[in-house]
Image (tube, rainbow, N blue to C red):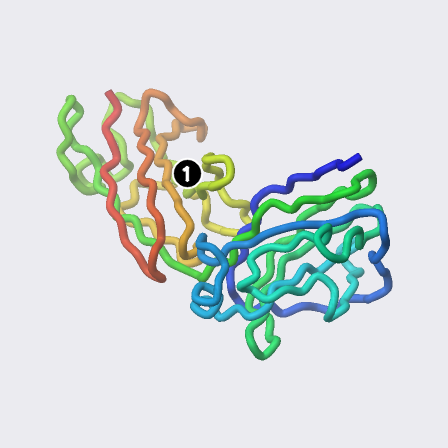
Amino acid sequence: MNYRVALALVSIALLPHLQGCIEVNFDPRGNEVSLSGSWTVVRKGANAETCAYAGIATVYLELYEDSKTTFDDPNFLRFPCEQGSFDTRNAQGKILERNVYEIRWVALDANGAEVGRSNAVNVQASFADHVDLNPANFALPASMRLDLSWDKDPGPGVQPGGCADVGNTGVQPPTGVVNMYYAIELLDPLTGEYSVPERDELQNAEVENTLCKQELSWPDLGEGDTYRVRVEGLDAQGRKLLPGYYSVCGPYTLTTAEQSFSCTVQTPP
């Protein structure tokens, strides 16, 4: 039986990480489960050029049995960045015991210093012969600013204006909208779907129950990633109103460390 486990896309920001005290007291090595995975760098193929651009020399997988136990072997599951993928079936074969693990992707520079790590990914290998990790992406930090204008024409035309032109709340009666909701969404290139990042990954991914804004900014995004921004109207109880102000701005792909875009929020019919 070759039972394969596919895991969700992992995106890793290349930022220094300070790790607390970790107890090393378990050994996952065995002969029951093989493992494979691959990675990109700023959404491009991992090669000598992209790895050098991002300052990554080595990629390795850190295994945890739980949040306070890890296994560390400098020769286990460590690969040159430009290798781009691994499959233990091609060499070592089955290398793990059957178990449930937490795995973190980690990037090291040429001096062995850690430059980025992912959040933990749960790996169910209790009944598997082979676990196939979905691709990870090592992303350089990038910032994005979105300048918003507001359609002040309630008719079919569009007349961009500022917050003062729409009553400083982003609304024009009688829509019933009294507050606004803003959310940035990240594209998963594997599925083609957008989702709002978790709060522990991006604290200001969602902003709600606030007034009209003419500028939104996010300093902690990833170069090479693609985003869109949803703008929706809320009623007095914080419920999304349709019809109401509703715009999807984007998509925007970040190709440099700092980028700005603009979008006009549509007037409800």
Task: Please name the amino acid that badge 1 sits on.
Answer: Asn
Q: In the figure, residue 178 lies in which quadrant?
A: top left
Crowdedness near tag 1: few (<14), some (14–19) or many (≥20) residues, C-alpha within 10 Å: some
Q: Quadrant of the C terminus?
A: top left
Position of residue 171 measured from the top left corner of the image (x, y, whole percent): 26, 31
Q: Secondary structure at mark 1?
A: strand
Q: Is residue 47 left or right of residue 214?
A: right
Q: Residue at x 44, y 30 (%)?
A: 238
Q: In the figure, residue 185 lies in which quadrant?
A: top left
Q: Residue at x 73, y 57 (%)?
A: 91
Vertical side of 42 occupied by 150: above or below: above
Residue situated furthest bottom in the rendering: 111
Q: Residue at x 79, y 63 (%)?
A: 71
Vertical side of 236 occupied by 228: above or below: below
Residue situated furthest front in the rendering: 90
Q: Is residue 156 left or right of residue 121?
A: left
Position of residue 231 measured from the top left corner of the image (x, y, whole percent): 35, 36
Position of residue 212 measured from the top left corner of the image (x, y, whole percent): 30, 41
Vertical side of 161 occupied by 155: above or below: above
Q: Is residue 98 left or right of residue 114?
A: right
Query: Count the marks: how many?
Result: 1
Residue under numbered circle 1: 209
Position of residue 25 measured from the top left corner of the image (x, y, whole percent): 86, 64
The front one of 229 and 226 is 226
The front one of 147 and 161 is 147
Q: Quadrant of the N terminus?
A: top right
Vertical side of 213 occupied by 44: above or below: below
